Image (cartoon, rainbow, N blue to C red):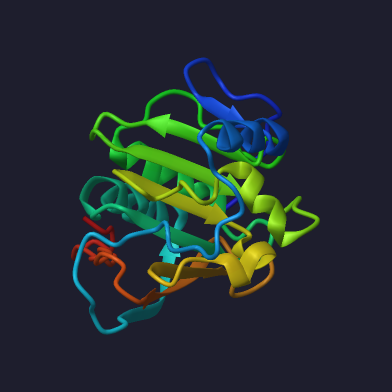
Amino acid sequence: MSALSPADDGPAGIAGVSPGAAGAAGAARGGGSPAGAGAFVASSGPVAGDAFGPVTLTEAMLEAWGERIGLDAGVPLLLALRGQLGAGKSVLARAIARGAGVSGHLPSPTFNLLYRYHAARGIDVVHLDLYRLEDPGEVWELGWAELGEGEEMVLVEWPERAEALLPPDRWDVWLEIPAEEATVRSVRAQRRGAAPPLPAPRPDPDGVPR
């Protein structure tokens, strides 16, 4: 699985948000620095934390799982995608967006920090990459307080950059490279709080998840 190249600009029809622009938009809506990350309201009642993995997935299997998440998972939903460079976070995020019905080029938000897509499923997919944050408080300039308020699926790469500000209702997903030059990924996930259920990879007899 190769690392995906970042892009500076989003394609037409996709909202790319820089910190300054997002901060101005938040101010125009009357937003300020909220007291916490409680804007992410789960759509289901409280549930016990669930976990699965580690499971070993090829790139094709990882993409198939992501597409199932995009198609089937309830919203609002936040996924905190964790792993080193090249572990497959962007591969998974793009697959989730495609599963939800986003078409066209899906650039990495490494430089814009945030892209928002309207998906054919009728929800918004919000893809953030916090790698370049210098201070966790910068997430407020990205409209963090408003994210996850409605029919949204929020995908956060490098969530460690704003760990203390992550909402309590979420899924943490870890992607690991089990060995140097490995072409598979070790994946595990943990549900936090009242996050909606997340479909797990379901291998067919031939080894490909449905």
Residue under the point 28% across and 58% down: 208
Report the residue that reaches farthest toward the bottom: 48
Front-most of 177 and 166? 166
Report the residue that reaches farthest toward the right: 134
Residue under the point 38% across and 26% down: 103
- Vertical placement of 120 versus 145: above or below? above
Front-most of 95 and 56? 95
Front-most of 18 and 197? 18
Residue 54 in picture, x, y percent from top left: 43, 79
Report the residue that reaches farthest toward the front: 30
Residue under the point 67% across and 30% down: 21
Residue 171 in picture, x, y percent from top left: 40, 68
Residue 197 in picture, x, y percent from top left: 24, 67
Whether residue 30 appears in this view of the structure is: yes
Residue 55 in picture, x, y percent from top left: 40, 75
Whether residue 2 appears in this view of the structure is: no
Tell me where residue 49 sits by quadrant. Answer: bottom left
